[in-house]
Image: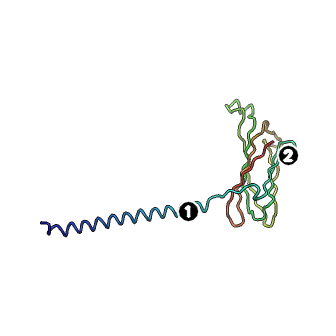
Amino acid sequence: MWKKHKKLIIAGIVVLIIIIAGGFFVVSNNTNSQDQQAQQVSDNSVQNLSPSAIGLKLEASSDKHKVRFTIADASDIKSIEYELTYNANSTAEEQSQGAEAQVQRGITGTANINSGTSNYQSSWLILGSQSANVVRYDTGVSGIAITLKITKNDNKVYQVQDKLDF
């Protein structure tokens, strides 16, 4: 009886080995694929730069109602996206709608840099609101922070963050 089933047992073992080897191959390829995808994501991720790497300066106007930023080394920068955030006292209307005494406000924008430009200065950004040439400046301003998303001429993207205290 052993001789009759010997061929079947050996065939079963060979099939089992093939199945296990195939499973190992599939798992191994899947892991390599995931590693490659993770590498591609990290290669395309935004890298951080220090403010000094581009000569970033954030300054307030003398009346402290406006802020602007300057980049001293903009020669290899193609474009900038910025987000300025700050805390300010909420208005009476906001408080009547349940807002806290201090709220966070923000200003966003973009700028294209002309090639060959060695430096860039933004326009003054109003810490408040403007409508129909009427400006309402925010009060109790604090915690001013800026985040720049910089695209360089080689299309690499960088992020720079800075703060301003006054």
Within-10-Å neighbours for mark 2: few <14, some 14–19, many 20+: few
List the residue tagged with mark 2.
61
Secondary structure of the residue carrying numbered label 1:
helix
N-term-proximal mark, 2 vs 1: 1
Q: Position of residue 124 (x, y in %)?
A: 82, 49
Residue type pointed to by label 1: Gln
Indicate the quadrant containing the C terminus: top left, top right, bottom left or bottom right: top right
Outermost residue on the top side: it is 96
Residue at horizontal 24 percent and vertical 66 percent from the top? 12
Q: Is residue 71 above or below residue 143?
A: below
CA distance for labels 2 and 1 = 44 Å
The residue positioned 76% from the left and 60% from the top of the image is 112
Q: Is residue 62 left or right of residue 140?
A: right
Foreground: 112 or 145? 145
Q: Check the image and name the residue furthest to the left.
A: 1
Q: Quadrant of the N terminus?
A: bottom left
* Quarter where residue 119 is shown: bottom right
Q: Is residue 30 toward the left or the right of residue 2 in the image?
A: right
Please identify the quarter of the rendering in which residue 134 is found: top right
Q: Amino acid at mark 2?
A: Ser
Mark seen at residue 39 = 1
User: Which residue does the image show at 84% across and 42% down from the upper left?
Assistant: 64
Which is more foreground, mark 2 or mark 1? 1
